[in-house]
Every structure is written in structure tokens, then in C-alpha cells.
Image: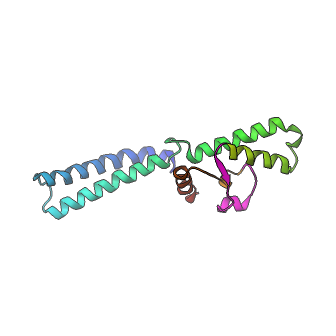
Amino acid sequence: MNEDIAAFVAPLTLILGGGLLALGALSFLGVDYFESKFKSRVAFAIGLAFLVATELIFVTSSSSGRYFAGLKVDVTDCELDGESKLPEERHKNSRVLHDYIVGCMQRLGYEWNADHDHCKEAQIATNSFCYLPTRPMARAIVRFQTTFE
């Protein structure tokens, strides 16, 4: 999610979700703010859903961890490293430089994966959409993040 939107939406969802969750939870203690137990339970469920959605915003944003934003940085680092070590290949359509960058990404814990539509458009070593982390949790988060690109 766009960090500008997340910065605006997250506080609202936390306040709204936390309030609904608290008011719904109070009904379990016998303090009813709603007309019926059903409405209290619905408020509890909606509040919980808002808090889970806010957590998903944090987990999938680039500021929460490396994930897709970190992958882009790693691609750039590998490109710089490859061009520094192989300067004669820099301006060529070189398979050597391509293989070096893909190998560098493999050493960092990524695998080449050309399934994403943006990767199919340009299957080059510097395309961040052509890599996925090998760790299962990071892989799932990156797949989720790139679904919306």
C-alpha cells in the first residue's frame, strides 16, 4: 500500500477498530453500550477486522520490513556490484552480466521467477518483479505486495 495513504488510514482504523472492539468486549462483562447483544458482538467483530486490516497495512508496507522494497534495493546492489566487477559488459546486452546479477540475488536468498506480468514484459536481471524470496513468509508477503502492482 502507498505509504502516504497508510499514514492517513492507519490511525483512523486503529481508533475506530479499537473503539468498536472495546465497546463490544464490554458487553461480555455486562456493560452494554448497544441495544442488543447481537449488535455488541457485531461491533466486536468489526473492530477486530479493522485491527487486523491495520496490521496487514503495516506488514505489507515497505517501512515494516525489507520485503519488496528490500528486494528492489538488493537488485540495485547486485547490479552495481556486477557492473563494478564486469565494467566491459556494462553497455552490452550481456548474458554474462545478467547471469552475475541473478547469481548475486540467489546468494542473497532470492530465486528467479518469471511468473509475474511485469516480469513477462521485461525479463531482465534488474527487474525486481522477476525475483521471489526463498523464505516462505517473505515469499508470501512479496507475492501479496506485487499482486497489486
Along the line of sight, the residue nearer the viewer: 63 or 99: 99
Along the line of sight, the residue nearer the viewer: 136 or 120: 136
Residue visible at 44% across and 43% down? 7
The extreme top residue here reads 84
Residue visible at 56% across and 59% down? 147
- Estimate the x, y position of residue 63 in percent, counting from the top left: 51, 41
Q: Residues in magenta?
A: 108-126
Residue visible at 72% across and 43% down? 104
Check residue 110 for magenta coloring: yes
Q: In screen coordinates, is 102 left or right of 26? A: right
Q: In screen coordinates, is 140 left or right of 32? A: right
- Estimate the x, y position of residue 123 in percent, counting from the top left: 74, 57
Above/below status of 83 relative to 133: above
Check residue 117 for magenta coloring: yes
- Estimate the x, y position of residue 69 in percent, counting from the top left: 59, 44
Residue visible at 79% across and 49% down? 99
**Quadrant housing the C terminus:** bottom right
Q: In screen coordinates, is 85 left or right of 1? A: right
Q: In screen coordinates, is 121 left or right of 58? A: right
Count of marks, rendered view: 0
- Estimate the x, y position of residue 97 in percent, counting from the top left: 82, 46
Q: How is the image coloured?
A: rainbow
Above/below status of 85 relative to 131: above
